[in-house]
C-alpha cells in the first residue's frame, strides 16, 4: 500500500484541517473528520469568495452581451475582421475584459488541487495516515494519539461507493446521484436565462455554444461517475464546494438557466 504524502505544500491545507478536527474532537462532536472536511471547504470558499465573485460577474456580463454579439455576426457575416473589430469595440463600450473571467479560475486551481491532494491522502489506511501526520506536523497540539475517525453517518470516508455496494446495497448510489444533480444545478445556473431576441436575427449554434450546452449534461454525469469510484470523503468535499457555489451563483446572478426549468415546473 502506498504511503500517504502529506508534506510540502500540502501542509497549507493539512494544518487548518487538523485544527478543525482536533477542536471538534475536543468538544465531542460526532463524525469529526467528515465535518472537518465540510467546514474547511466552506472556509476555503469564503477565502476565494472575492475571486469567484469576480469570475461570476465577468461571465454574466459576457452572456448579457450575447444578443449584441449575435447582431454583429449577422450584420458582418463572412467578414471575420470586421466582426472581431466590432466585438472588441462592444467590449470596450461596456467595460468588459474577455479574459477577466479566466484569471480567478487560474488562481483558484492551486488551492483546490492542494485540498484534493490532502483529502485523497488522509482517507487512505488510517494507521499509515496517523504516522505520516505525526511525522510532518511540528505542532504538538495537532499530532494524533489515535487514528482519524473516518466514519460519517453510515459511510466510511475512505471507501468508495463501488466498494460499498456489495455490503450496503443501492443506498450508496445516493452519493453519485446527489453529486451529479448538484453539479447539474450549478452548471445550469451559469448560463443566462433564455432571452427573446430580435426575430430578424437567426439563432445559429456554433461549436462553442453546442459544446457549452452539451457539457451542462455531460459534465455532471462524468462527475457522478467519478464519485462512484472515488472515496466518500472526496465526494463530501466536492458536494460541499458545489452547494456553496450554487448559493454564491444565486446571490450574484440569480437562477440563471434554471429559471426556464422553474417556469416549466
Image (cartoon, rainbow, N blue to C red):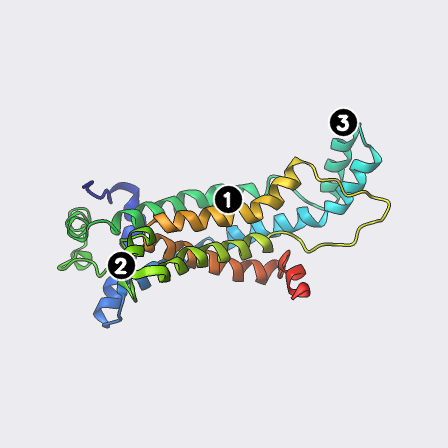
Secondary structure beneath dot 2 equals helix
Quadrant location of the N terminus in the rendered image: top left
Q: Distance between the residues labelled 1 and 2?
A: 39 Å
Q: How many marks?
A: 3
Q: In the rendered view, would you say 234 is above or below 84?
A: below
Q: Nearer the viewer, mark 1 or mark 2?
A: 2
Q: How far apart are marks 2 and 3 (CA)?
A: 62 Å
Tell me if residue 250 can be seen. Answer: yes
Residue picked out by circle 3:
81
Disc 2 residue crowd, few under 14, some 14–19, many 20+, Cα 10 Å: few
Residue picked out by circle 2:
167
Quadrant location of the C terminus in the rendered image: bottom right
Q: In the rendered view, would you say 194 is above or below 35?
A: above
- Taking depth in this image into account, of 206 and 175 the one nearest to the observer is 175
What x and y, as percent, mark residue 207?
65, 35
The first of marks 1 and 3 along the sequence is 3
The image quarter containing residue 36 is: bottom left
Residue picked out by circle 1:
105
Q: Which residue is drawn at the image coordinates 57% and 51% (left, top)?
A: 54
Q: Which residue is drawn at the image coordinates 35% and 45% (left, top)?
A: 114
Disc 1 residue crowd, few under 14, some 14–19, many 20+, Cα 10 Å: some
Amino acid at each position: 500500500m502506498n504511503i500517504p504524502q502529506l508534506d510540502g505544500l500540502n501542509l497549507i491545507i493539512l494544518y487548518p484541517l487538523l485544527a478543525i478536527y482536533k477542536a471538534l474532537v475536543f468538544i465531542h462532536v460526532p463524525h469529526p473528520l467528515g465535518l472537518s472536511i465540510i467546514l474547511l471547504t466552506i472556509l476555503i470558499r469564503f477565502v476565494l469568495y472575492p475571486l469567484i465573485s469576480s469570475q461570476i460577474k465577468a461571465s454574466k456580463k459576457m452572456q448579457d452581451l450575447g444578443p449584441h454579439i449575435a447582431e454583429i455576426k449577422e450584420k458582418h457575416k463572412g467578414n471575420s475582421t470586421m466582426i472581431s473589430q466590432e466585438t472588441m469595440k462592444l467590449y470596450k463600450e461596456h467595460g468588459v475584459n474577455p479574459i477577466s473571467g479566466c484569471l480567478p479560475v487560474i488562481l483558484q486551481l492551486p488551492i483546490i488541487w492542494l485540498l484534493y491532494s490532502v483529502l485523497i491522502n488522509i482517507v487512505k489506511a488510517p494507521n499509515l495516515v496517523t504516522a505520516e501526520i505525526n511525522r510532518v506536523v511540528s505542532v504538538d497540539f495537532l499530532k494524533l494519539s489515535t487514528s482519524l475517525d473516518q466514519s460519517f453517518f453510515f459511510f466510511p470516508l475512505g471507501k468508495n461507493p463501488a466498494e460499498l455496494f456489495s455490503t450496503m446495497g443501492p443506498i450508496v448510489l445516493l452519493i453519485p446521484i446527489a453529486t451529479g444533480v448538484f453539479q447539474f444545478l450549478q452548471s445550469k445556473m451559469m448560463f443566462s436565462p433564455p432571452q427573446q431576441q430580435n426575430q430578424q436575427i437567426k439563432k445559429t449554434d456554433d461549436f462553442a455554444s453546442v459544446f457549452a450546452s452539451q457539457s451542462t449534461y455531460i459534465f455532471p454525469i462524468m462527475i457522478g461517475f467519478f464519485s462512484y469510484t472515488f472515496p466518500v470523503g472526496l465526494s463530501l468535499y466536492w458536494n460541499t464546494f458545489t452547494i456553496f457555489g450554487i448559493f454564491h451563483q444565486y446571490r450574484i446572478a440569480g437562477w440563471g438557466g434554471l429559471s426556464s426549468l422553474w417556469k416549466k415546473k
